[in-house]
Image (tube, grey):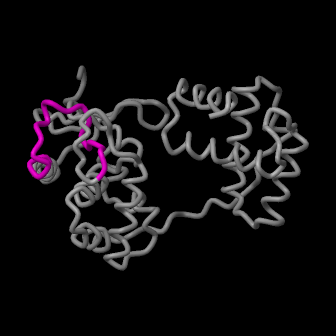
């Protein structure tokens, strides 16, 4: 690992960026450096402008993808290299913001029923029952399951805010069944969804958001559903069940 890469990773971790954002930013900066065959700290805003044109004109990337690359380079220049940056000099590319494709309740249910992987099934049930984001799900801890109040405590969600989401009896039962399948004691674990490969027995390390992404993709493929990456937007409870529970004050 180069010194510059370590500096950027340290800044990303210090600001509590999600795993997926860290990965995307590091990959974006690495691609920028490969394009010019020089270290990023030797490049300027003019290089970024040329790089943007290349991404659009030659590589035919979508505006949202190019905007993500620019965000990664902005983080590098401003937070790591401490260089000036203004939106006037380096505007983000404009792109349409279409409404997401929404799956029907039947499609979501078919995806859940189609999977024969216990972990994937409980992941989909948790997403369906709570409307959590991938990173939020992976960072759930055993202690976040409040069966007394029937809520799940989400720590440091979007905007780094805490919130509670409803916990249905059906989801609680599914989580308990999953832990019985693991043959592990929840009291000895920190993470609700332990990592550790196929065995999932690393109680000190959670699964990654890539595991969640793969679970949704595989279930959609088996069920013949479309728009698997937009699964969260299709959840019946995504907007309604994420409100603060009236009995959760003081927890």
Residue in the image at 48% along x and 68% along y:
101
Q: Which stretch did the figure color magenta? A: 179-197
Report whether 52 appears left or right of 98: right
> Observer-nearest residue: 47 or 34?
34
- Give the image location of residue 180, x and y in percent: 8, 48
Report whether 38 appears left or right of 188: right
Q: Is residue 217 above or below residue 51?
A: below
Report whether 5 appears left or right of 100: right
> Observer-nearest residue: 75 or 131?
75
Residue in the image at 14% along x and 48% along y:
182
In magenta stretch: residue 186? yes
> Observer-nearest residue: 105 or 144?
144
- Give the image location of residue 121, x and y in percent: 23, 60
- Give the image location of residue 215, x and y in percent: 34, 61
Residue ranking furthest to the top: 250
Q: Quadrant of the C terminus?
A: top left
Q: Is residue 227 above or below residue 78?
A: below
In magenta stretch: residue 10? no
Residue in the image at 27% along x and 54% along y:
198
Residue ranking furthest to the right: 46
- Give the image location of residue 190, x and y in percent: 24, 31
Quadrant position of residue 77: top right
Q: Quadrant of the N terminus?
A: top right
Q: Is residue 205 above or below residue 111?
A: above
State the count of labels: 0
Report whether 91 appears left or right of 116: right
Quadrant position of residue 152: top left
Residue ranking furthest to the front: 1
Quadrant position of residue 82: top right
């Amino acid at each position: 690992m180069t010194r510059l890469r370590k500096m950027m990773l340290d800044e990303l971790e210090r600001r509590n960026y999600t795993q997926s954002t860290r990965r995307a930013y590091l990959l974006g900066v690495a691609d920028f450096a490969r394009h010019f065959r020089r270290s990023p700290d030797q490049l300027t805003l003019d290089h970024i402008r040329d790089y943007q044109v290349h991404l659009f004109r030659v590589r035919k990337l979508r505006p949202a993808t190019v905007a993500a690359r620019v965000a990664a380079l902005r983080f590098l220049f401003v937070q790591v290299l401490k260089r000036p940056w203004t939106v006037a000099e380096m505007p983000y590319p404009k792109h349409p913001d279409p409404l997401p494709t929404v799956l029907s309740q039947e499609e979501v249910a078919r995806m859940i029923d189609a999977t024969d992987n216990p972990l994937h099934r409980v992941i989909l049930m948790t997403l369906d029952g709570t409307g959590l984001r991938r990173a939020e799900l992976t960072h759930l801890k055993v202690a976040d399951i409040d069966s007394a109040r029937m809520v799940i405590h989400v720590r440091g969600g979007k905007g780094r805010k805490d919130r509670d989401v409803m916990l249905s009896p059906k989801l609680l039962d599914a989580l308990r069944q999953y832990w019985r399948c693991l043959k592990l004691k929840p009291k000895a674990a920190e993470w609700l969804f332990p990592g550790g490969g196929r065995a999932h027995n690393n109680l000190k390390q959670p699964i990654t958001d890539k595991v969640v992404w793969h679970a949704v993709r595989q279930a959609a493929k088996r069920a013949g559903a479309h728009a698997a990456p937009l699964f969260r937007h299709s959840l019946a409870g995504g907007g309604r069940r994420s409100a603060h529970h009236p009995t959760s004050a003081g927890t």
